[in-house]
Amino acid sequence: MTDTGIGASVKRVEDQRFLTGNGNYTDDINRPDQSHAWILRSPHAHATLKSVDTSKAEAAEGVIAVLTGADMAADGVGGLPCGWQIHNKDGSPMLEPGHPPLAVDKVRYVGDQVAIVIAETRDAARDGAELIEVDYGVLDAVIDMDGALAGGSLVHDNVPNNRCFDWELGDKNGVDEAFSKADHVVSIDLVNNRLIPNAMEPRAAISEFDRSTGQYTLYTTTQNPHVIRLLMGAFVLQIPEHKLRVIAPDVGGGFGSKIFHYAEEAILTWAAGKVHRPIKWTAERSESFATDAHGRDHETHAELALDKDGAFLGLRVATKANVGAYLSTFGSSVPTYLYATLLAGVYTTPVIYAEVQTVFTNTVPVDAYRGAGRPECTYLLERLVNKAARELGIDPVEIRKKNMIQADQYPYQTPVALQYDCGDIPASFESALKAADYTGFEKRRAASEKDGKLRGIGISTYVEACGIAPSAVAGALGARAGLYESAQVRVHPTGSVTVFTGTHNHGQGHETTFAQLVSESFGIPIEHVEISHGDTDQVQFGMGTYGSRSLAVGGPAILNACNKVIDKAKKIAAHIMEADVSDIEFADGKFTVAGTDKEMAFGEISLAAYVPHNYPIEEIEPGLDENAFYDPLNFSFPGGAHICEVEVDPDTGTTEIVGFTAVDDVGRVVNPMIVAGQVHGGLAQGVGQAILEGCVYDDDGQLLTGSYMDYTMPRADNLPSFSVATQSVMGASNPLEVKGVGEVGAIGSPPAVVNAILDALAPLGVEDISMPTTSQKVWQAIQDSNVRQAAE
Amino acid sequence: MPTVSMTVNGKSVSADVEPRTLLVQYLREHLGMTGTHVGCDTSQCGACVVHVNGESLKSCTMLAAQAEGADVTTIEGLANGDELHPMQEAFRENHGLQCGFCTPGMVMSALDLVQKNPDPSEREVREWLEGNLCRCTGYHNIVKSILAGAQALKG
């Protein structure tokens, strides 16, 4: 290997530009003759649009055009599509009400798009928007899921009871039978709190239309430019791929919220074709809060059947999931196939049955947010298992060990469709217990008690499924897309390399990690490799970056293209060195003839490929530029154990995380520094969900947590330094032997934190608390417990 | 429109701007210096931190006109050619950034901390960062970077 190859903590190549202020984010870009847009948004959660009078706005100084949903409808613009079809229990397909980019007859959440004002400056556009007169017919809003299902106001007239679909997975009769034989049944009711993703860069877009070529270009803050081109071009605006270029330049974080095809992208692109000027739009943070797709928002009742010794016999789960006012791009897949298929978790539960109802409400759409379904599943399982341990009087470590899938049971077929390819959770668990000094906890608890603090320790053991694949399986489950990845490896004449990947880098460090793969493959310095991504006119095709897929799915595509390059280069080397191709060996950047001292450097072969004077031209073409598409054999299944230790101040309810240990199995690690960074970030989001973050709408659908003054983002002083380690079983379903790492922190950590807080509060008789476990909530739980105990 | 003049990264600059123009807009939209970012509209996130007359300041909290005659330093003013400032280098060395969006504000804020407190503790760094939000790193490596940067600047 080179010192910049697989396994090296190479410092990131992208950092120089970001550290010097030379990043190139969408809002940093300005196009010649650019105009600016402001989107007029609904102030009501649910209302009919009786009239929209734009005349005063159109006459305002600096305003170029004002366009509405009626204009879009007149042009035959389509609705925003959903990318995953789910079927009801009775086999019928889910209901998919229309999702016009600009509202036509009704607005369905606060922030829904009503009109676009295009002006010479952003201020003029904003001032213009204030002159639009909208006559709203305000309707009752449905915000909570029970109210919506009870059939109050209908978000969509053609969706009875606001129920989008009613889906099931697993063996209902088998579970009923298991419960009938159980010695114990433990049940739990949980809310998985609604979160607002809050990538630090607000969404932005610039559209333009070239009248000479008929070509549209959209710069946008997306995680997947080709997906946006496909969805917007084919379903919304009817622009074929060769006339539509989508560019995702530097993107300031996504966490899922920038996967989806948003209305503004379609509105701006369409409008650029009407006004013949580039149009720029950048969300204010308030707009991000109100209109970026939110995450989580589940209500679940779950029951676990156990025998007298604490062995799990069956699991029954009923979940209601809020999808918001419209089905977002992947809104239907998150609470179904990304959630219930993981309900075996790390355990050998033999039978499982889950049913999920999804509910339309007058809130912003809910879709994938870091973890997407797996955090909801892990939280449920790890809270339930802890509750079972408590009710049966078994140690939380022992009940997990007793029911855990053992290393020799892989590949492990779960009762909920997935087959885990490989893993060893017991080993990660042991390492985590040791690293966290689990056995020394009682001493620390006693020391805290002397300081007047309540100390608790909480465990979460988890497995997750990421890098969704193969395409055929995803398709059979309703995905309306393939989930492969592509790569083009272009070796230039002098031996430097440009790699075009269909994934997108928005913080994950691909420009470094992927270059390490190429450095390793070709034995060349990392400085000779450039990773290109994000421009549909440069990159052949791609499905983008989400679901921890980039290295597990995109990496092997790069590897395979590199191998094609090497195969071809060997033929060139054999010809020039007058040897049989079977005698050509390639290592450390040199082609050699076995058993001789003949050798040629990588750069000499590439030059020969482009200057084919002495060349096997009858056998192979000139050039050294190879393409690969890779569709994995299976998901990848990272897993591990997270252990959180907290101190609660009983006087204030304030929780301090005094220790957090994560031991994760992420398969082969290409760049340990970057992997640790990914885990840190995920943990912070998980801790945020557990303690700080919660989206709140009032009964009228007004977003009460619409700014950083109201929505509690984790800050540096809310978090500890994390103890993270990897303990890997090499991945079995892709040639790089990697697993995903982007989401493990956010998936494993929330139940570890909440279990720790409940452990701290257990001596007071507190048995339940809901996320976010704010100081106020903890304090209230303590007070309620005091009152209860006094009464007894 | 009034003319606003100041010194940015050692250079005299001047632009005619609407009175409501914020300092961050002046930098980004009138000077084309897009290293300073806007991450919120309530002066919470800290992505826009610059130095004004030697002190860190959220450039969304000040009108450009209020900075008339001021000496402003932005993220673009730190490196010496391709050679990073020791604090920038500490962020690179310790993986103190991921998407890079909060980074300019983090680095500028960190520099003000170490000029006020050259040898901060981890707790002091974490408390100082109260006005700077990051969604990628969990702050773990940012804190590590600032502690390392402080040592490098002392040395």
Image: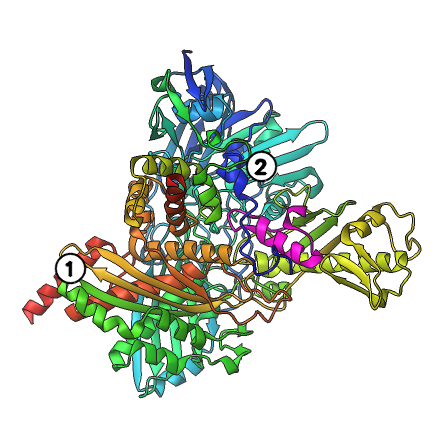
* Residue A594 appearing in the image: yes
Quadrant the N terminus of chain A occupies: bottom right
Q: In the image, residue B75 lies at what x, y percent?
A: 45, 32
Name above or below for residue A207 compared with residue A571: above
Q: In the image, residue B105 lies at what x, y percent?
A: 40, 36
Q: In the image, residue A201 lies at what x, y percent?
A: 45, 40
Chain letter for mark 1, please.
A
Residue A478 found in image quarter = bottom right
Label 1: which residue? A650
Between label 2 and label 1, give the one nearer the viewer. Answer: 1
Name above or below for residue A671 compared with residue A65: below
Residue A521 found in image quarter = bottom right
Residue type (three-letter) at the residue carrying disc 2: Tyr
Residue type (three-letter) at the residue carrying disc 1: Pro
Q: Residue at x 72, y 27 (%)?
A: A212
Residue A314 found in image quarter = bottom left
Q: Nearest the camera: A507 or A596?
A: A596
Q: Nearest the camera: A61 or A405?
A: A405
